[in-house]
Image (spheres, helix red, strand yellow):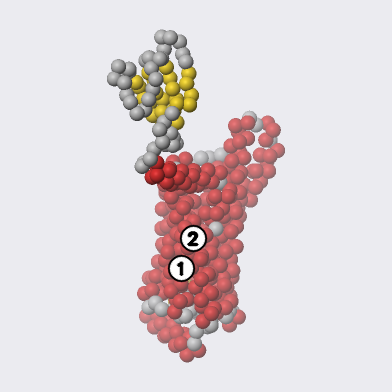
Amino acid sequence: KDGARERGAAARRSSAAGTADTGPPFSASTYELLALLIATIGILGLCNNLLVLVLYAKFKRLRTPTNLFLVNISLSDLLVSLFGVSFTFLSCLRNRWVWDAAGCVWDGFSNSLFGIVSIMTLTVLAYERYIRVVHARVIDFSWSWRAITYIWLYSLAWTGAPLLGWNHYTLEIHGLGCSVDWRSKEPNDSSFVLFFFLGCLVVPVGIMAYCYGHILYAIRMLRCVEDLQTVQVVRILRYEKKVAKMCFLMITTFLICWMPYAVVSLLIAYGYGRLITPTVAIVPSFFAKSSTAYNPVIYIFMSRKFRRCLVQLFCVRLLRFQRSLKDRPAAGNEKPIRPIVASQKARDRPKKKVTFSSSSIIFIITSDETQQIDDSTKCPSTKINVIQVKPL
């Protein structure tokens, strides 16, 4: 094992030396374009996923067991936007990989960890939709938290194996990021690549296909008997179908973003690395990182609850801002309040007057109907009750 590690380290050093001799794989303008692209992906992913986390924390009606999985995906995407993008962005600015061996290990470990967390969460989400729509079973928060714990432990097991000697993290062909060593022909490294694809790609995709095959069949059967159900049951069924469609769109988008990278990695692993140039390798890598910005957009457009909470959040902030602007000039020169609505009641009832100002509505109630109400002078002989109603 020690000899295999030494050979792998020698191969990495010779590869790095060859890269230094041949010069950078891209031109200076291409590096600038890549820096702009990866910065855009990182900013969008950071802002969108942070918005989802804020909405989930602020609005209690979004705190459901199903939405907990969406929050877990947003958290992993947020971490990718912070850690997985920053190393590549700084390397693009310097036209080469500027980090040491520890930085390369961290970049490969973090990107692999958060990527596996996302795909396994989508797998569990597909299974949750399956038992909800097909078997009519409702999960609770304890089930969701246990599932999320298993997801992170499973992901840590796969990404921690290269740290313990089963394969290793090394610089990719394009030289702007690190991942598992796909090119190594050592039996130890090749076996990891094989089981890695089985455990983190083939099995999850198979589970998703199985679950959504049964979900589509169940939805078709529900359409046939929809006329026999009550209005409330029909609404519940339509809501569950809409959530299932949203989850299916999330899974499809994620697989579309990551499939090119998986295909390129498989070609490199099985001896077709000569066909993969740095230009061919960089496009799937950046396309896979762009998946971090898509899921929040899917939540907002397909989930009415998320959409309403988003509108409420921004409207409240806007109203508070407008109110602060109105209150500032009104503090110095407030216009006198004049009654514009007056209602005369019976003789034994008090007189009511409604007045309006720029910041509130004033109800002034007097016990004497003939008493004239003046804001500048207060008559001590007349009992006046003032009720001030602040606007929303």
**Residue 155 to residue 267: above or below:** above
Q: How far separated are the C-alphas under marks 1 and 2?
A: 10 Å
The x and y percentages for residue 311 are 51, 45
Tell me the quadrant of the picture where the N terminus can be found. bottom left
Tell me the quadrant of the picture where the C terminus can be found. top left
Q: Nearer the viewer, residue 132 or 313?
A: 313
Q: Nearer the viewer, residue 371 or 356?
A: 371
The x and y percentages for residue 142 are 42, 44
- The residue labelled by disc 1 is 85
Residue 87 shows up from this direction: yes
- Callout 2, which amino acid? Gly
- The residue labelled by disc 2 is 45
Residues at badges 1 and 2 in contact (C-beta under 8 Å)? yes
Alpha-carbon neighbours of circle 1 within 10 Å: few (<14), some, or many (≥20)? Answer: many
Identify which residue is drawn at 44% across, 82% down.
Answer: 12
Numbered disc total: 2
Residue 224 location, quadrant:
top right
Identify which residue is drawn at 59% across, 41% down.
Answer: 239
Residue 178 shows up from this direction: no
- Callout 1, which amino acid? Val
Identify which residue is drawn at 43% across, 43% down.
Answer: 326
Q: Nearer the viewer, residue 317 or 214?
A: 317
**Residue 187 to residue 310: above or below:** below
Secondary structure beneath label 1: helix
